[in-house]
Structures are given as C-alpha cells and as structure tokens.
Amino acid sequence: MRTLLLTLAVALIGGARLSAADEPKPADTQPTLKVGDAPPPLKATKWLAGSEVKAFESGKVYVVEFWATWCGPCVVMMPHLGDIQEELAGKVTVIGFTAKDASNTPERVSEFVKKRGNKLGYTIAYADDRETYDAYMKASGQNGIPCSFVIGKDGKIAYIGHPLFLDEVLPKVLAGTWDAAKGAPELEAADKLWDETYSALMKPGDPAAQLKQWEEFSAKWPRLAADPYMTSARLKLLVAAKRFAEAQKLAETVVTKAAKRNDVAALGTVADAVSADAAAGQADLAAVGVKAAESALAIDGETATALIRVIKAHAVAGNAAKVKELGPKAVTAAEKEVTGDKDAIGTLRVAAAHLAAGDKAKAKAAAEKAIGMVDAQNAGLKKYIEDQAKKYVGESK
C-alpha cells in the first residue's frame, strides 16, 4: 500500500492527492522489535493533547502511531484515529507520537495541534529527540510513516503496520481472537487487493466500470472501502459518471464528518471533486464544494493551496466576483511560498494560482520557468514537473 501511495503521490498544487512518506531503508538489517515483543517505553518531551501515558497497563489496549507534520498520509489518517478513539473509548488508548527533525520542529508541531485543537480526539505526544522513534520504527524495520503499533492486553505488540488496517485488527485484539500468524497473511491479501482496486480507480477509464470495481471490493472489505483514499476516489468517479445525487449525498456526509475533526484533507478532496468540469451546471453540488473549500480555508488560513481551491469552487458555482477578489491573494500567497530559484514545485503552484485567477499567459510563463528549474539528471522530478506543466503550457518539448 505504501509503495502505491508513493507512486501515485503528487505535490499539493491547488489541491491534489497526499503523498506517502518514506525514509531511506538501512541495508542488511534485521528487525529487533517484532510482533509478540514487549513495546519500548514512550519517552516524550511534551504531551500536547490528551493525558500522559506513563506506562502500558496490563489488561488495556493501546495504539501508538508515528507521524510528522510534513507527512501528508499521516494528516489524512488523523481523523480516522480520532474516530477509533471515540468509538472505542475506555477500551483503547490511541497515541500519536511525533519526534523532532529538521522539518518537524516543536513550533510546527505545536501550531499544528493547536490549529486542530481538541477535534483531533486522541492523545498526542512530542519528543525533542529520536530515541522513542528509533526504538519502535528503526528497531522494527519500518521505513515509512504513518505506522501504527498495537499493544494488546497482555502487554505485547500485536500488530505493526499501516493505520488503515486498525479497523480490522482492533476488534479482534479486544475480543482476544487476534492471531497474528493467521491475521497477517489475510491483511497482506487485503492490502494487495486494495492496491489493485485503488490503482484501477485512479487511472483514466470508464467511471461506471470503476465504480463497479469499488463495489466488489466493498463487498469483501467494507471498512477498507470506506477509508479516506477510497472515499475520495469514489466521489470523483460519481461526479465523472454524472451520478450527481449520489455524489452530493456522499460529499455532504464527508463534509459533515470533516467538520467534526477539522479534517482539511477530506474537505479538500470534496472541493476538488465537485469542482471538476463534469460537475458544471450542478448548483447544489457546487454549493457543497464552496462550503468544503471555505471550511478548509478557515482552518488552514490563506495558504496558496487553500485559496486556489476556494477560487476553483467559486468559479464552478458561478461566483465571478469572488474569483476576482481572491485571485490576487492566491498569486501573492503562492509567490511567497516559493523557497528559492530551484523550487519547481512552488513555482508550479504559482502557475496554478495565475490560472485560477484567470491569467493564462502568466500561468504558462510560470510553468515554463518551473520546467527549467529541474536538473535533467533528476529524471523522476523532471518528468513529474513536465507532466504537471502540461496543464498550463501544453505538451512539453
């Protein structure tokens, strides 16, 4: 799953999918922390939300999930963790643990948690060193986040893996029926089918056939079919298939749920989906998109991405005055976010802001500038930038 999410990942340019986060994997190392082992202690500098967990108590179940502010998929999964904590209150304690690095500073972590407030719904811990992170992640051979560790009632690690699967694992751990030897292969099979299904949903194709494929997956794994990634893909396909009543119902459900958790990622996916060309003329659906985009803007502030998203939503809704009003703000915000003369991603965001504001010529110029920023030896990034720039300049030479 993590490999697929990384492959399909794109940068946030006016709203897009969130990327997987991987770190370099050490060569020729064997995990020293495995399922069945006792978990290392949690050594936190600050407990930013919820109550401090001084030790794992016998007879209780815990989830320790490692995340960072810069990790898109971590942010996507946070509302899900909050839902788990609410649903299993008194039975499970969910702990989000994050450690300092160059981009995950104490200031950024504190600001992130403060912005979302108590709506996160579970315990958050921060460490100004990497001791606990290494004791879990490196010791278990995990090289990507988000990654969760379930500690069972016996005080042993019952599961190590992506938090998407917690809905499948936790009920069995609580009931005492979780068998890692049997459950792990079943989850591997589910993971493989998830990859195949999600990949099929994200590729260009027949929306009706793709939705049928989602339904087949949902029949086998209903909880996984309702995860944030699948829901986003399904919403886009409902719009593309012109099943507007279903799309509006799903969009409204997602927006209502997102408001409960200050879920900017979910609000963004709704706004992006219902702002697609296929939704043109659907006033009620467009109104949901505006609500989602405006809600995300209120939470995240006037970032370039949030402003571009709002402009697109208002454009689909026919609110020309709002587009004219917000266009210059989006361009200014995007230009301020460019970090240097090699920031091709940031420069593409400037192109997106110009296009949202209605200035195609400046959008094209910014996109061409972005292409020229990437060293030809960086083939992967070069191809990505060229592919994205086609939105503004046409086929790259």
Image (cartoon, rainbow, N blue to C red):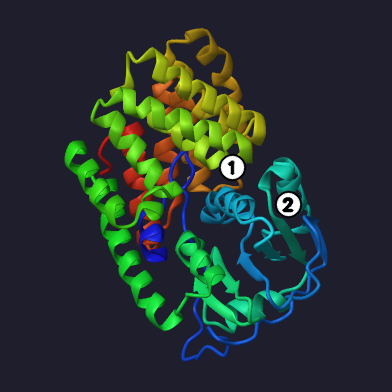
Reply above or below: 208 against 323: below
Q: Earlier in the sequence, mark 1 or mark 2?
A: 2
| Pointer 1 residue | 338
Quadrant holding the N terminus:
bottom left
Residue 244 at x, y percent in the picture = 31, 23
Q: Is residue 143 visible?
A: no
Give the quadrant of residue 364: top left
Residues 196 and 257: in front is: 257
Q: Is residue 42 left or right of residue 218?
A: right
Dot 1 falls on a residue whose secondary structure is: loop
Residue 288 at x, y percent in the picture = 47, 22
Q: Residue at x 33, y 65 (%)?
A: 190
Q: Residue at x 78, y 68 (%)?
A: 53
| Pointer 2 residue | 108
- The residue type indicated by label 1 comes to Val
Q: Is residue 230 left or right of residue 92?
A: left
Q: Residue at x 40, y 20 (%)?
A: 285
Task: Judge depth for marks 1 and 2 and give the one in front.
Answer: 2
Q: Using the numbered discs, state the Cα–Cα distance from disc 1 to disc 2 in whole angstroms.
A: 18 Å
Dot 2 falls on a residue whose secondary structure is: helix
Reply above or below: 112 against 149: above
Residues 21 and 285: in front is: 285
Number of marks in the rendered image: 2
